[in-house]
Amino acid sequence: MSEVRVRNLSLAYGTAKALDDVSLNFPDGQLFGLLGPSGSGKTTLLRSIAGLVYADHGSITIGGESVERVPVEKREIGMMFQSYALFPNMSVADNIGFGLKVRHLDKADIARRVGEALELVHLEGLGSRRPHQLSGGQRQRVALARAIVTRPRVLLLDEPLSALDKALRSEMQVELRRIQREVGITTIFVTHDQEEALTLSDRIGILRGGRLVRSGPPKELYHAPQDRFTASFLGEANFFSGRPEQAGLRLAGGGLLPWPGELAPRVTVLAVRPEEMTILPAASPPPPGACAIQGVLDGISFSGPTAICRIAFEGRQVSVLLKNSELDIIPASGPVTVCWPAARSMPILEGTEP
Ligand SMILES: Nc1ncnc2c1ncn2[C@@H]1O[C@H](COP(=O)(O)OP(=O)(O)OP(=O)(O)O)[C@@H](O)[C@H]1O
Ligand SMILES: [Mg+2]
């Protein structure tokens, strides 16, 4: 078992808190996506787990054992950091085998394990090349093979795909997930890219200003974010503020957004994902029980398979994501009704505003 547990971890550089009382579990064998804006403490958290920096407070355990007194080389961690560097003068095979050589494995063992690692990352036959003779994606695979060849208990990946273009990146995402599943290694993966985190992760944690905002399975965080930051960081959201009533949320303009069941008194904001909403011509009645608002369509931007419609509503803008085929049945501009199933509104708890 190699679950990583972090408890009440705090670390300050001078007066700046890079980590502020972070507690998180990284379950055994799972891929955990760590997200957050630049400077939110993601790298610092990985470096603390690796033993490259030491926290001021708190504890870290791997597989139930405290690693406080365990130096970095004994923590059995594979790392691939933001600026991973391959040794330019060594072959691909020597790059991958380097960690085994410093552990004094014999040559035959090294050759066998490097061969297996090359196969795992689909680079069979390229062992004798130099890094400069590889594509960006291939170099990334070498770095990944180098991180896992020592059979670490935990794999820490800090933005491993950030240098790649979109197509290569999606390809490597699939590869990374495959390799992680095959090896079954507890993996913590840092990314700026929320879509990447949603696609790859078994669980996600969101950091902000050194604090953990929320953690959980991707679907739960996306569909029930509970706080404004998580709602807008993981995708797009429209926010509606008002006064909670028994039947729903009373908007400032007088309209009611019905809520199935009783809305908690603390909920003064409902968030709605643009893809949950549809647009009807202004005169058509919304389905019974649906949330509906009357606004003015003032712009449509196409993005290939879908389009974002911008609707002016009570002095602000609401975004609605439509399939291109849905555009045919709405006016190109002017008054419209925006509606969505009441159960698709996501209650945001008060006191969690940014
Ligand atoms: N060695 C250091 N000395 C002083 N401050 C540091 C040091 N390393 C990080 N920090 C600060 O700690 C905070 C957290 O940094 P960290 O590198 O963990 O952020 P991050 O979430 O990884 O950001 P990014 O997404 O840009 O990589 C930042 O405010 C950063 O400026
Ligand atoms: Mg970082």
Image (spheres, rainbow, N blue to C red):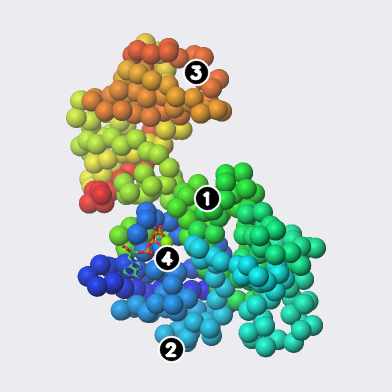
Determine the quadrant in which ligand 2 lies.
Answer: bottom left
Q: CA distance from mark 2 to mark 3?
A: 62 Å
Task: Label 1: state its secondary structure.
Answer: helix
Question: Toward the viewer: 273 or 46?
Answer: 46
User: Identity of the amino acid at label 4?
Assistant: Thr
Identify which residue is drawn at 46% across, 49% down: 194
Sequence-first disc among 2 and 1: 2
Label 3 belongs to which residue?
327
Identify which residue is drawn at 74% across, 75% down: 113
Residue 248 vs 292, above or below: the answer is below
Q: Is residue 214 visible?
A: no
Q: Is mark 4 within 8 Å of ligand 2?
A: yes
Mark 3: give few (<14), some (14-19) or many (20+) Cα within 10 Å: some
Mark 2: give few (<14), some (14-19) or many (20+) Cα within 10 Å: few
Kindly give the residue lying farthest to the front in the view shown: 89
- The image position of residue 174, as x and y in percent, is 64, 52
Identify which residue is drawn at 70% across, 58% down: 133
User: Identity of the amino acid at label 3?
Assistant: Leu
Label 4 belongs to which residue?
43
- The image position of residue 252, as x and y in percent, is 19, 30
Label 1 belongs to which residue?
196
Q: Nearer the viewer, mark 2 or mark 4?
A: 4
User: Identity of the amino acid at label 1?
Assistant: Glu
Question: Toward the viewer: 110 or 204?
Answer: 110
Q: CA distance from mark 2 to mark 1?
A: 34 Å
Which label number is shown at residue 69?
A: 2
Q: CA distance from mark 1 to mark 3?
A: 28 Å
Q: Nearer the viewer, mark 1 or mark 3?
A: 1
Sequence-first disc among 4 and 3: 4
Task: Label 3: state its secondary structure.
Answer: helix
Q: Quadrant of the N terminus?
A: bottom right
